[in-house]
């Protein structure tokens, strides 16, 4: 299957994994620290992120400059989505929407 | 973490991360574990998640980190985990050293019945000396 890039920008979140995408979605409405992220993602998507998975994904997203760490509150580091992070999330969600629409259309055409 | 055993388990898993990661995240990760345990997440699953995360952290190639260094670090992490597990195991109550199950009988022995089992210990209650010379066959 070839890559699709129709001028809206390359979907760099295609390879970062589900946990990273869920973290970006959770951070889209404001900064959160680790525990809030786990709770929010559980509520939002029904996915229970393990703490090891969470920190791995946070480090990866930070290295890609898609999120940034804010000054620590007590022992907790809140994270915030960056402008490139928001742009990458938009591109990825658009891509998912296209795939989803195509899938629904094919289900209709197939009469299943 | 109120339960010291859960605390030790999570701390042992956190010690498997590279020092750079621990400097940055260890305090927060320990606090996160406390909150998750309070919510009912088993300490075992939290420790396992951190262990897998630590392995990934070591195995992720970083600029300036050679493969041999990664392999050595992984070995150290595994060894320190072994020590931690041994420490945890040593806090368990001592168990009986005698296994209740008897090793399987040699092939030439007939199947044992309940009466045979009762006869297994001599009436004197003392073990009989067994002469195991060359080519001996284990008694039934």
Image: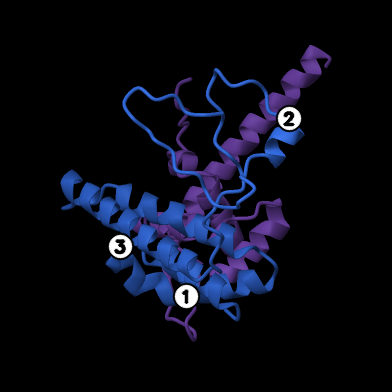
Chain colours: A purple, B blue
Q: Residue B106's x, y, as percent?
A: 52, 24
Nearer the N terminus, badge 2 or badge 1? 1
Query: How much space separates mark 2 and mark 1, taking CA atoms?
Result: 62 Å
- Please tell me whether residue B123 is drawn above or below residue B94 in the rendered image: above
Query: How much space separates mark 1 and mark 3, taking CA atoms?
Result: 15 Å
View extreme (front): residue: B124
Q: Identify the disc placed on residue B28.
A: 1
Quadrant position of the C terminus of chain B in the picture:
top right
Q: Residue A44's x, y, as percent?
A: 70, 56
Element type at mark 3:
loop
Asked if residue B80 can be seen in this view, the reply is: yes
Which residue has dot 3 on it?
A: B18
Q: Residue at x 45, y 51 (%)?
A: B52
- Please tell me whether residue B118 is drawn above or below residue B31 in the rendered image: above
Q: Are marks 2 and 1 on the same chain?
A: yes
Give A38 or B95, whichever is nearer the viewer: B95
Query: How much space separates mark 3 and mark 2, taking CA atoms?
Result: 59 Å
Element type at mark 2:
loop
């Amino acid at each position: 299957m070839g890559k699709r890039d129709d001028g809206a920008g390359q979907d760099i979140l295609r390879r970062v994994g589900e946990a990273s995408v869920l973290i970006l979605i959770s951070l889209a409405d404001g900064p959160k620290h680790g525990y809030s992220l786990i709770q929010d993602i559980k509520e939002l998507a029904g996915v229970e992120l393990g703490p090891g998975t969470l920190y791995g994904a946070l480090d990866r997203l930070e290295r890609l400059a898609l999120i940034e760490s804010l000054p620590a509150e007590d022992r907790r580091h809140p994270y915030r989505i960056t402008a490139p992070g928001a742009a990458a999330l938009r591109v990825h969600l658009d891509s998912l929407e296209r795939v989803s629409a195509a899938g629904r259309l094919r289900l209709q055409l197939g009469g299943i | 973490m109120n339960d010291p055993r859960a605390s030790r388990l999570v701390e042992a898993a956190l010690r498997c991360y590279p020092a750079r990661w621990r400097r940055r995240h260890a305090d927060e990760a320990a606090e996160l574990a406390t909150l998750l345990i309070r919510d009912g997440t088993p300490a075992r699953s939290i420790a396992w998640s951190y262990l897998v995360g630590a392995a990934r952290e070591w195995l992720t190639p970083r600029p300036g980190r050679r493969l041999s260094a990664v392999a050595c670090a992984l070995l150290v992490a595994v060894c320190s985990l072994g020590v931690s597990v041994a420490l945890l195991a040593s806090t368990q109550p001592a168990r009986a050293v005698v296994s209740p199950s008897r090793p399987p009988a040699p092939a030439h022995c007939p199947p044992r019945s309940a009466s045979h089992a009762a006869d297994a210990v001599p009436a004197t209650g003392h073990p009989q000396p067994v002469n195991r010379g060359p080519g001996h066959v284990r008694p039934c």
